[in-house]
Image (cartoon, rainbow, N blue to C red):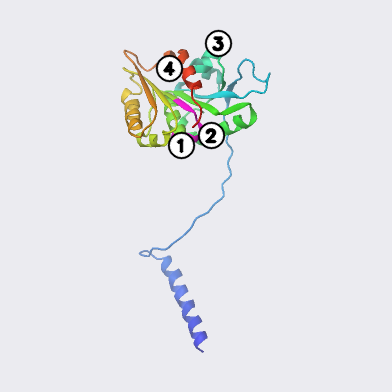
Amino acid sequence: MFILTFLAGCADLQENKMSCSKQPGFQTERAFEKTVSKTLAIDYLLYLPEGYGRAEQKWPLILFLHGAGERGDDLNKVKVHGPTKIVDQGKALPFVIVSPQCPEELWWTDEVEVLINLLDEIESTYAIDTQRVYLTGLSMGGFGTWTLACKYPERFAAIAPICGGGEPFSTRRLKNVPVWVFHGEDDPVVSLERSEEMVEMAKKMGVDIKFTVYPDTGHDSWTRTYDNQQLYDWFLEHHKK
């Protein structure tokens, strides 16, 4: 009789709990789980350096993120600035260069998952020295560079964001990633302060960081940067820590 009474009491208690959980004014513990499958896709330009494939050699890689004006579905637009422009004009660079194109109306900060999966695919498909993977981008791509590097700092040996910005406190994750920042002093599109606040916080966080400000220069701080051999030499000086 005692057992039956106890079980009946437990059943009433459970019923009361379930009833309470459906009423306002009660807080209950819940859990949510759902499996979601998705397809990631992006178009990109691929540059293989002279000598690639002739010997068992691993090559450094540059992942280049273009600006907002080059978004869309025409990869020729990606060739107008940066390393893509340089190699398209016939200059040889000793890197594998991957230059994806952001879809229209999206931003690189929205495409972090696509970019890191693209990097996975390139590293597994081509002869890449994974200790020498570099990231750079201009304007919208500068913002993307900060965002991607701060989310996956272990993937990059060095980064070079140009006229970009981001969340300053996230730079704490770049303690093992050398950074070289570029910006025009008179940039009317992305203010110099956006880079300054990133650099200031990064220094406080102990990041190895360089900052180049071009006097009397507007938004186009990338042409001088990508035309400068010192940038590519600086990349090659760094391996992942």
State the extent of the magenta-drawn residues as a range: 150-159
The amino acid beneath tag 1 is Lys
Q: Residue at x 32, y 23 (%)?
A: 192
Tell me how far mark 3 sits from mark 4, CA to CA.
17 Å
* Residue occupied by mark 2: 116
Of labels 1 and 3, earlier in sequence is: 3
Marked residue nearer the N-terminal end (1 or 2): 2
- For label 4, the crowd category at 10 Å Cα-Cα, with few meaning under 14, some 14 to 19 and many 20 or more, is many
At which x and y percent is residue 219? 37, 18
Mark 3 / mark 2, whichever is N-terminal: 3
Mark 3 or mark 4: name the one nearer the start of the chain. 3
Residue occupying image coordinates x 46% and y 69%:
18
- Residue at numbered disc 3: 91
- Camera-nearest label, 3 or 4: 3
How far is the residue under mark 3 from the one under mark 2? 27 Å
Which residue position is annotated with label 4? 222
In the rendered view, would you say 1 is above or below 198? below
Instruction: Tell me, for residue 151, which label it has, or none.
Output: 1
Disc 2 to disc 4: CB gap under 8 Å = no
Q: Quadrant of residue 188?
A: top left
Foreground: 137 or 57?
Answer: 57
**Which kind of residue does numbered mark 2 sit on?**
Ile
